[in-house]
Image (tube, rainbow, N blue to C red):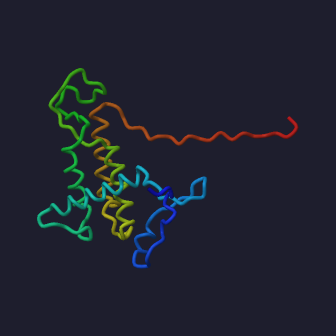
Amino acid sequence: MSTSKGNDVGEGSSSNSSSSSSLVAVIDDRNQTAVAPVNRYESQKRRDWYTFGQYLRNQRPPLAISQCNSSHVLDFLRYLDQFGKTKVHLNGCSFFGQPEPPGPCTCPLRQAWGSLDALIGRLRAAYEENGGSSDTNPFASGAIRVYLREVKDSQSKARGIPYKKKKKKKIPTHTHQPGA
């Protein structure tokens, strides 16, 4: 069993150099090279990209990402609703507009607006990282922004609590007066 912690990352034959150059390496405190673990965001982004690709391949006829447009993305978002865990009360529901309903109802479960918004952000980045142009990015389309705004508004009304934009924390600046 070797005790080296990846000292040979990037070493090898020239035929393997293209794959080894895609590895992310960091130097630890003992000046040894190790492969950095992928962070949570990157892992989610990769998983979301794969899931969207699977969705396109399962269409009849299957679609390539280059054929994808905003209507395919909207269909994907609607498809994901069936796996949602957020109760969204319908207009006719007696609990519509109540933040904490007193009992169960038959209203559908949907994807939460925040989850969809984060998903679109990750897919938008993944599209461009995988060779797509920012000009043709279907995840950056105005139709997607309109859809997300409509979901946000309807979920806000259904639960009776408006979404509030998070304010950035201001870093207090300390003024130092010499001689005081």
Q: Is residue 164 left or right of residue 123?
A: right
Q: Is residue 171 above or below residue 106?
A: below
Of residues 13 and 145, the one nearer the viewer is 13
Which residue is at a point 37% across and 70% down the rendered structure image? 133
Of residues 169 and 47, the one nearer the viewer is 47
Q: Is residue 36 left or right of residue 87?
A: right
Please state the horizontal and vertical placement of residue 171, each as a whole percent of the image: 62, 41
Which residue is at a point 43% across and 69% down the rendered structure image? 20
Indicate the quadrant where residue 28 lies.
Answer: bottom right
Please state the horizontal and vertical placement of residue 103, each as a whole percent of the image: 21, 22
Which image quarter is the N terminus in? bottom left
Of residues 149 and 125, the one nearer the viewer is 125
Which residue is at a point 18% across and 63% down the rendered structure image? 57
Please state the horizontal and vertical placement of residue 145, each as a whole percent of the image: 33, 54
Which residue is at a point 82% across and 39% down the rendered structure image? 177
Indicate the quadrant where residue 128 lies.
Answer: bottom left
Indicate the quadrant where residue 173 lies.
Answer: top right
Q: Is residue 14 left or right of residue 76?
A: right
Of residues 68 and 83, the one nearer the viewer is 83
